[in-house]
Amino acid sequence: MIKVSKYQNINGITCYMNSILHILQYISPLINYINNDSYLNIVNEKNKTKKWIIVELAKLFKLSYNNPNNIICPIRFRNCIGIHDGRWLDNEQQDSSDFLEFLLSKIQEEVGVNTFKIPRFEIYSNNPITSIKQISAYKSYLNFYSKEYSPIKKIFTSFNKYNKICGTCNNQSIRYEPNNILQLAIPDKCNNIYDCFSHLTQLSKMNDYNCEFCGNKTFCYDRTTLWLLPQILIISLKRFDNFMRKNKTNIDYPIDNLNLSNYFDNETPHNKNNSYELIAVNLHYSNSGIHSGHYVSIVKCHDKWILFNDENPVQEVDNPQCNDAYILFYKLNN
Ligand SMILES: [Zn+2]
């Protein structure tokens, strides 16, 4: 008998929300942070009477742990997020990836405090050009983390490096940008997740580039590389196009060892331990677009793979590999 609780569907449309909650309540760094209760001082100091999402989330997760084998209705939580963004109270299917992005950025913002003291990042290189790039990346982290810093901001944040090389003067224009969720496009020929990463990091040629350095309207070479990956890596497969049509390509993904070393930038100091293990998968069952279908999740709990479907009892499954995979959750192997 598996001792886990389950969230109840509200009005037949909240599977996008429940499927994400079923995963988040088993992400240990997030749960450790929530259980520590230190965020309460921060939010109470900001505003004692405000409806804080993190407070409702913590109540919901505590209720779930204390009542294994029960079905819990997340109506208070839903009402709370609905105050912050009305679309979560609409009786319509939503995108689970949009909901996850909303929830993570909202709780990070709520418990964040402005600070200049953030945990250090290492910068080291014997090559001065590399060092300059590392310092410029470090400034990007400082800008990002010092605004509304909290320990949970670091759990999920990755940084990509975006490099544009002018086709006329070869000047490089570099940006480092944070993400909670790594969005991966699915290339035409795609068998596995590594094909998506190759596609993300390949050099491509872009026309209509205005170079700020030489002032020419010209072309450029464009390249994205990984700069820093977080403790919990969330990968969302871009299965829906602008017309909300679904790409049903079957994509294999590793369970024990996702290794992304090949997709890092040559100059990053953060490409050391990049082996990840799968901890959960969010699935979208449907033949058609994003506004129909059903979301469920397969989550690793107590070393078993458990299928959480808010329309059925929880069930143990042999394998978390599934054609309907939409969002993958990986944890850094220590
Ligand atoms: Zn130029």
Image (spheres, helix red, strand yellow):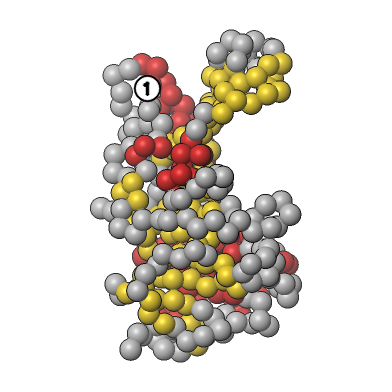
Q: What x and y, as percent, mark residue 250?
A: 50, 58
Q: Tell me the residue at 56%/20% (across/down).
A: 165
Q: Residues within 10 Å of mark 1 (few under 14, many from 20)?
A: some
> Could one spot residue 150 in this view of the protein?
no
User: SS class of the residue under badge 1?
Assistant: helix
Name the residue beneath numbered marker 1: 131
Q: Is residue 134 above or below residue 334?
A: above
Is residue 137 positioned above or below 277 on the image? above
Of residues 78 and 334, which is closer to you in this image?
334
Q: Quadrant of the N terminus?
A: bottom left
Above-or-below relation of 174 to 127: below
Residue at (51, 79) in percent of width and height: 309
Given residues 256 and 125, the one toward you in this image is 256
Q: Position of residue 332 (x, y in %)?
A: 33, 53
In-image side of 125 versus 102 (left or right): left
Amino acid at circle 1: Ser
Q: Residue at x 73, y 54 (%)?
A: 243
User: Can residue 228 be seen at all in this image of the molecule?
Assistant: yes
| Left or right of residue 91: residue 254 | left
Residue furthest to the left? 334
The image position of residue 312, as x and y in percent, is 51, 85
Number of numbered tags placed on the structure image: 1
Identity of the residue drawn at 69% across and 20% down: 210
Observer-nearest of 310 and 60: 310
Quarter of the image where ligand 1 sits? top right
Q: Residue furthest front?
A: 189
Q: Position of residue 206 (x, y in %)?
A: 64, 26
Queried on whether the Cβ of the residue with tag 1 lies below 8 angstroms from ligand 1, the answer reads no
Front residue (pair 49, 105): 105
